[in-house]
Amino acid sequence: MKELINKVGFPRFIISVFLICLIMLAIYLKIPLSGLISDILVRFGMNAILVLAMIPGIQSGIGLNFNIPLGIIFGLIGALISIEFQLSGFTGLFVSIIIAVSLAIIAGYFYGKMLNKIKGDEMTVGNYVGYSIVSVMCIFWLVAPFTSPELIWAYGGNGLRVTVSLESSIAHVLNDFWHFYIGSVRIPTGLLLFFGFCAFIIWIYSRSSKGLSMIVAGSNPQFAISNGINVDKQRIKGTIISTVLAAIGIIIYSQAFGFLQLYNAPLYSAMPAAAAILIGGATLKKATIIHVLVGTVLFQSLLVVALPVVNIVAEGSMSEVIRTIVSNGIILYALTRKEGELA
Amino acid sequence: MDLLQMKNISKNFAENRVLNDVSFSIKEGEVHGLVGENGAGKSTLMNILFGMPVIQSTGGYEGEIHINGKTFNPTSPDNAMDAGIGMVHQEFMLIPGFTITENIKLNREKTTPTFLSKIFGKRLEKLDLKSMAKDAKAALKKLDMDIDEYVPVAGLPVGYMQFIEIAREIDKTQLKLLILDEPTAVLTESEATRFLEVIKKLSNLGIAILFISHRLDEIKKITDSITIIRDGEVVKTINTDDIEINEIAGLMVGREIELSQKEKDERKIEDEDILDIKNLKVNMPGELVKGLNLTVKKGEILGIGGLAGQGKIGIANGIMGLYEASGTIIKQGKKLLLNNPKEALHSSIAFLSEDRRGVGLLLDHSIEFNIAFSSLEVQGKFLKKIGSLKLIDSKAVRKHALKMIEDLDIRCTGPKQNTRHLSGGNQQKVCIARALTLEPDLLLVSEPTRGIDIGAKNLVLDTLISLNKEFGVTIIITSSELGELRQISDRIAIIYDGKVAGILPPNASDVDFGLLMAGEDIEKVVD
């Protein structure tokens, strides 16, 4: 038993046990499992790229990128622009992504430059930069020159809605692509494929000579310098890739969700993503695709299964409470681990 | 009666048995040496005795400990301190911003009652600084230390800090046994000599001392008896007078070790200079190089010695571009670009840093990746091309690592093991393997045997010699241990005040080396 816990890791063990209990409870309460599994698959695909965005940050040595709201904002802008021009379907999706990525590269570069000036405090500062950017953008959403009636307030005038429906543009584009059923479980093929594609690129990159330089720079800067690596440059690279993934991630998330969430919504994106990768077994120094897969599956399953179960057993929005406790608790736990130890 | 008796102590870490039936005892006032290779189990034994939490959290130990005949079962360092055991750790445990007095009396402060303390209890009493200072002074005096006890610890020389740690321990009135873990490792030779005198004095005061060290000559000089541990078992406990250093070394590693200088067979040292250093200045804190001139012949092993702080460490770091440098370095007729590590690596120079764990290794990566990375990064080896992508060739990396592990006898669980969990000697071998993989024609080695036990030490030095012989690699070895420089170098440059004080052959007399290190003129010395 002890060996099993050691091998799997304490947090993963606890969460798995909790999850299994919930699933058994769900079966007992006659909640259809197929629906739960379909939900888990969708939520996994929605969130996985945002979790993936944590990898380059950890690899390049800036730690957990709590500033993914930065990337998310440019993802939102990309999506908004494609709606403004009334693009829909895959055209809309790809145009959104292209715009978002190009903006995120620029933003990531400058953010990376800033992080090089505050080495050691990246996570704290990242958090606050995230808050500031989101607040600044709240003003931007109000004065942005968009005119499409789908985007602005129903009563007209200036300013974007708090939530923008994607029904007529890119909603469920990927979820519906090549989807099929196994029994009554719906498989969102396009969504999973797209994540697979992104994960594959990150995996290949982390095995390439350029990616390895970045990983080494992150894991021991002095060692990297003595091997002639420009550490600052590698950190900027990691920040850019992380920001770009966040921008793509929010577009994928929104198309599955069916809505764009503006204003304060991006604030609540970093914690769950950071928690998920930590649950998966990443440390502040080391993260791999496996950690993303395991972490996202566990974290999202927990939420999906907990919601109906808890709503029957107890009352109110317990699911949200559980999500907050789990995500913040796991981040706290990970930050208390020493260097090199597994969370 | 014995002051301390440890009986049949055994300890497992998971499935790993690190101590097996270890028994030994110490009398009052005895200086007892504990020797063994790295990983022999010395530290674990001391952790058990001192009640370190790591022992309890990994399942406790087997066996019995008696102090003055009474059973003693330490579960925390507090227990050990109450029983009169003091320990001076390898790393200093002092608070830099506090004065010497405050450090010595930490958590045992003398206090006088105040108004508040009468209401809220003893924790709010006022510090009685005067009587604390008196105590501190007395403790320092016992160590023959003449230093103002109001000085903050930060900024004091390392040697002083060591003495302050000891003063803290002997200030505890009930101190009966003092454990010293590698106390002289960080001291200069003169400091170490003084330190050993102090030990003698303490033992005359009736305090038993358990002395752990790699330096066998010290052990021989100072202890009354010695316990030798190998692979978690006691090999021998013996009176110091009945054993010779060579024998101790032999028992430690379980085979005979040649301590004297190896016979040199003829090697090819060419007239050609491989490196010509002119007016090199390196801004490395604590090891400033101030306008150094040095030429290195192709194919030789050049030793660089000197006292700590004189700049010998700065030379290699300056050549590699790790610290800001100025001057001219000409390698085989080509001027080397300074302050650029990549350029140095491209010029076929490799470097083994003195800071093995900090600069030399990726502690949380596998052995195979550590070995391959430099050459992958600098020379583009171990890569396979897929389209325009260059990916790491895991098979080639694995194959090379396995070969290196075999060639250098790196003891590990396999090429996938993280280097963090290797012993010092094996970590150094991984560093050497990494440098070898670069196939350099000039290898800079800094303190290659620091913190490495005697068996691994010779393996490391042998490896360097064979590199030089078989592949014609020119080696510049920087070391604080003159003995090891004399063992392998062709010439030895002694650095004083950031410059070369003189170059001596390895068979020059101790006196000559001593004088050069102390900054005497080379002409005077040679006369």
Image (cartoon, coloured by chain):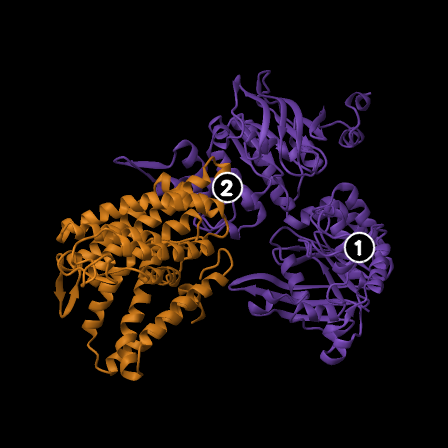
Chain colours: A orange, B purple
Disc 1 target residue: B150
Residue A313 percent coordinates (x, y): 30, 84
Numbered disc 1: secondary structure:
loop
Q: Residues within 10 Å of mark 2 (few under 14, many from 20)?
A: many
| Above or below: residue B178 compared with residue A116 | below
Q: Which residue is drawn at 14% across and 61% down?
A: A167
Residue in front for this viewpoint, A34 or A111 = A111
Labelled disc at residue B23: none
Numbered disc 2: secondary structure:
helix
Disc 2 target residue: A223
Q: Which residue type does callout 2 highlight?
A: Phe
Q: Are marks 2 and 1 in contact (CB under 8 Å)?
A: no
Q: Which residue is drawn at 31% across and 74% down?
A: A319
**How many numbered discs sit on the rendered protein?**
2
**In this rendering, position of residue A49 left or right of residue B167:** left
Residue B126 percent coordinates (x, y): 77, 69
Residue A25, visible in the rendered structure: no
**In this rendering, position of residue A74 left or right of residue B331:** left
| Above or below: residue B456 compared with residue A306 | above
Q: Residues within 10 Å of mark 1 (few under 14, many from 20)?
A: some
Q: Which chain carries label 2?
A: A
Residue A188, visible in the rendered structure: yes
Residue B111 percent coordinates (x, y): 79, 70
Q: Which residue is drawn at 27% across and 35% down?
A: B388
Query: Which of the 4 image quarters holds residue A291?
Result: bottom left
Name the image quarter holding the C terminus of chain B.
top right
Residue in front for this viewpoint, A13 or B342 = B342
